[in-house]
Image (cartoon, rainbow, N blue to C red):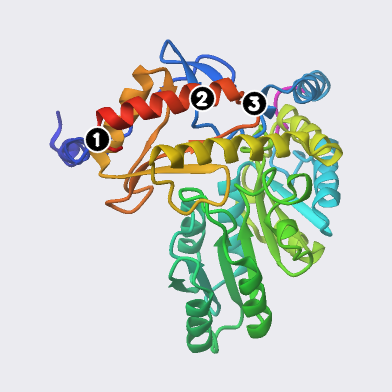
Amino acid sequence: MDNKYDFFVRELQKIRDEGLLMQIRTVESPQAAWIVMDGRRVLNLCSNNYLGLTTHPDLREAAKEALEKFGVGPGAVRTISGTTSLHVELEKTLAQYKGVEDVLTYQSGLCANIGAISALVGEEDALFSDELSHASIIDGMRLTKAKRFVYPHGDANALEKILEKEGKSAVKKLIVTDGVFSMDGDLAPLPALVKIAEKYGALLMVDDAHGEGVLGRHGRGIVDHFQLHGRVDVEMGTFSKAFGVVGGYIAGKKVLTDYLRQRSRAFRFTTGSSPADVAACIAAVKLLDASDKLVKQLWENASYFKKEMKSLGFDLGNSETPITPVMLGEAKLAQKFSQRLFEEKIFGQAIRYPSVPIGTARLRLMISAVHSREDLNFALDAFRRVGKELNVL
């Protein structure tokens, strides 16, 4: 092997030795409560498919109709000839559902964060973000020349002190936070952040990827959950989780979305989402707007599972949502626990550094509305057996 590849060989071996090598498994069936993965039928506890919409007949039918009418792709970037009537319908439908003036859709939540953050602030501005911000927020911040400040996780008082000290010289100030923190399942102190943003004249942006379809009335998200409509400047959401499809969006004032249409590179220079995906997203929004049955079932399942896991003695951290972290600490233990669960027909992925800080390795479980009580009890029995075997309980 050429010497120029030696670095990569050494780094991969280091990752293996530290128990951090990521095993990417292959799914051979639709996303559901049970899936076929690497040739084995397993109970799926690691999907972002919160409401089971990936296989919902309404979404499937909408995608098929769009495929027949528009073909498989939009054929161009949105700013030339790639904006179909479906894209326009989705943005209008979602704006009404969210209770905002306008929505701009992107190809993914990551693109939405990168595209919005990098366009909203520049060299004379300042960014303030939570220390546990999602990687897409961090990458968006790195693409700007704005001054960047990080405050301790969930600490609104610390944010205010930093803002008061460092924000005076900034032309624009942008506070960015996750709504639901994806690795721990806890919520941002959004009411306090709103008050601080208003006090200091800062824009406030919330990444609600794990709040859409989960929090608020009919799954309208964290802004609706805290009844803060009109007081959060930028809402980022994704269609890739509870909505069951793929894509991302920015919601807020029309002047903001109009500006992003002109200045967001992630919007302007990439082909838009496919017609089938867009049509399925429209169907998902309409379904949630009409009924909150699946949202209620999600919370019922999550509450039951978390209560029983705690009674077994597992540490579930500070989660306030269906995200269920099973805290294990050491990366190799998390990896071993995950493998033993797989042997017991449970898919529970180990999450390790760099996704979480060193020493906080865990399994991150994602409970769904389509899990039956029988499914959850099957999982609880497996966790009890493996937990005792590996001296976790």
Label 3: which secondary element:
loop
- Which label sits on residue 34? none
Around disc 3, counting alpha carbons within 10 Å, would you say few (fewer than 14), some (14 to 19), or many (20 or more)? some
Label 2: which secondary element:
helix
Give the amino acid at mark 1. Asn
Give the amino acid at mark 2. Asn
Residue 73 shown in magenta: yes
Question: 241 or 364, which lies in front?
Answer: 364
**Image quadrant of residue 65?**
top right
Q: Is residue 125 above or below residue 136?
A: below
Foreground label between 1 and 3: 1
Give the amino acid at mark 3. Val
Image quadrant in which the C terminus is located = top left
Q: Which residue is mark 1?
A: 391
Image quadrant in which the N terminus is located = top left
Question: 79 or 96, which lies in front?
Answer: 96
Q: Position of residue 95 (x, y in %)?
A: 82, 51
Q: Earlier in the sequence, mark 3 or mark 2?
A: 3
Q: Residue at x 83, y 41 (%)?
A: 289
Q: Which residues are magenta?
A: 71-75
Q: Position of residue 81 (x, y in %)?
A: 77, 39
- Which label sits on residue 377? 2
Q: Residue furthest top?
A: 39
C-alpha distance separating marks 1 and 2: 21 Å
C-alpha distance separating marks 3 and 2: 14 Å
Label 1: which secondary element:
loop
Q: Which residue is mark 3?
A: 370
CB under 8 Å between discs 3 and 2: no
